[in-house]
Amino acid sequence: MAKLNRDEFRDRVLGCWTGKNIGGTLGAPFEGTRDMVELDFYTQDLGGDPLPNDDLDLQLIWLYAAEELGVYHITPRRLAEYWMNYECAPMGEYRNCMANIAAGFYPPLSGSCNNDQWRWSNGAWIRSEVWACFFPGFPDEAARCACIDACCDHEGEGIWAEVFTASLEAAAFVEHDIRRLIGIALDRVSAESRIAKSIRTAVAAFDEKLSLAQARERLVEVNSETGFFQAPLDVGFLTLALLYGEGDFEKTVLSAVRCGDDTDCTAATAGAVLGIILGRSRIPEKWCAPIGNRIVTKCLAEYGIPAPRTLDELTDRVTAEAERARSVNPALLEITDSPTDLDGFVIPADGETARLVAMRSPYEVSLELPFARIGADLAGGPEFEPGVPKRIRFVLRDISCVMGAVTGELLLPEGWQASPCRQFVLPGTCLGPQCGEIEVEITPAACGEAVMFLPVRFTLSGRKMPEIRMIPLQRKGCVCPDLRTRNGDKFFRRSLRLNERKIYPKCEFSF
């Protein structure tokens, strides 16, 4: 049985968070720079503390969600509630995510709707380390969680970006060759994506022995259509930093900042990757001493979340969750006091991460029922226009009753029409993940509301009590006013539950 030594694993996790703080602090003053940057060390008088960084802040929320729910019980909708309760950042995609959720558009709609400017941006891939640390050596497990996470405030390329970084970081616990790590992560990204194209461009530039400046300019040109502050370009810069850094921590984080643009993000992730590979014990002390061990936050609600105050505390809590994940899923690497033994261990081949992400519509609403889970795919998004037919595809994702069937009925407002009819049946069996589907077309009537909710009544065969779930819709050309008024909100809605650390025996793998 392959295993990781507990102390060695802890050193790599602490190295991850230390590298994250170093890179984020180093790059922060140059964020948004569109030219090459010249530097060789921190440019701030730090006084022993790092600069606050949202790249780390949101991962403290995800850690708390894992501690309360168990990582295998996290779903996009559950993660959205933690986001609403504990996150208070005013930045673009974060703000839009919270505003969408407040209006009734839960993930993945929260990432794909009212979010054109930020859906492919950098907010998701910069917060992937926590998933990697939960699943050392298992990039597909980390990638699955990355999908759950990223769809809250991103779509398409924004999700692929976090799949790439989470996969690479998870693999880095057992594989330390940068080139192989990039290949492992790239295998888990759609080959047709802009993210993959940008990574391949970076690798080709390195192989051609271009200078860092020349490679950077090639990436800027290849990504001219999407432009700056977007994931395709900055994940390309991250890849350049890893390649041109050649396994040297200092050279890697400096290369990331020198490429410019979202420098705190690229350098923070590059630092985290090298921190995993090297461990905290091998990161040069000249980089560690100025930023110390403390965690400084800026995007967390002031009350309600027991956030770790130091990197050591964060590391201890993250490693505890990794061990708990292994107790639920014995296929993961064992973490023991024995020496690390990876003889015969092969990083599992890519499962179906890319296929699952590619096949799922960014406009599918997940309707959770006591007896089933049904997806309602809103063709083209949740927008509707009076008098214009709109298609909704209902898919039975899971059902608790063998050979059962779910009956649905659209409870349409006055004047709305449905074709072929308001009622439909989803026959299914528990033997497959997708049991049945049907497409219904609705034609809305005039509606004065910017956002409205379409009730659907579901009944399981053999039972009398119905369950009603709502499908959110948005009138074309309208955006709920709430979507523009939530900058800087703080949420204090949940009491502390510091001692609740439950282990759940049943796994939920869906997202």
Image: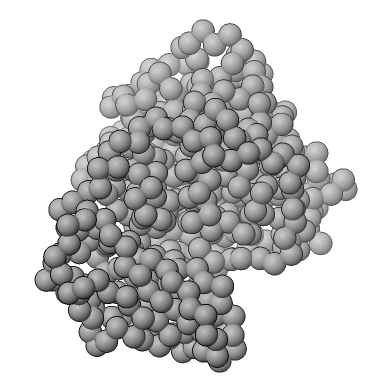
The colour scheme of the drawn protein is: one colour
Residue located at (58% from left, 40% from top): 494
Task: Say left or right for 161 vs 363.
Answer: right
Residue 117: x percent and y percent?
26, 43
Q: Nearer the viewer, residue 155 or 268?
A: 155
Residue 445: x percent and y percent?
15, 69
Number of numbered tags placed on the structure image: 0
Residue located at (71% from left, 49% from top): 322
Decide: is 10 above or below 32.
Answer: below
Residue 441 seen in this snapshot: yes
Residue located at (52% from left, 80% from top): 465
Residue located at (36% from left, 55% from top): 105
Q: Nearer the viewer, residue 490 or 151?
A: 490
Q: Nearer the viewer, residue 39 or 147?
A: 147
Decide: is 137 above or below 87.
Answer: below
Q: Tell me which corner region of the image, top left, top right, bottom left or bottom right, holds residue 311.
A: top right
Residue 401: x percent and y percent?
59, 85
Residue 254 seen in this snapshot: no
Task: Say left or right for 382 vs 25.
Answer: left
Query: Outermost residue toward the left?
Result: 387
Q: Quadrant of the N terminus?
A: bottom right
Residue 265: x percent and y percent?
44, 33
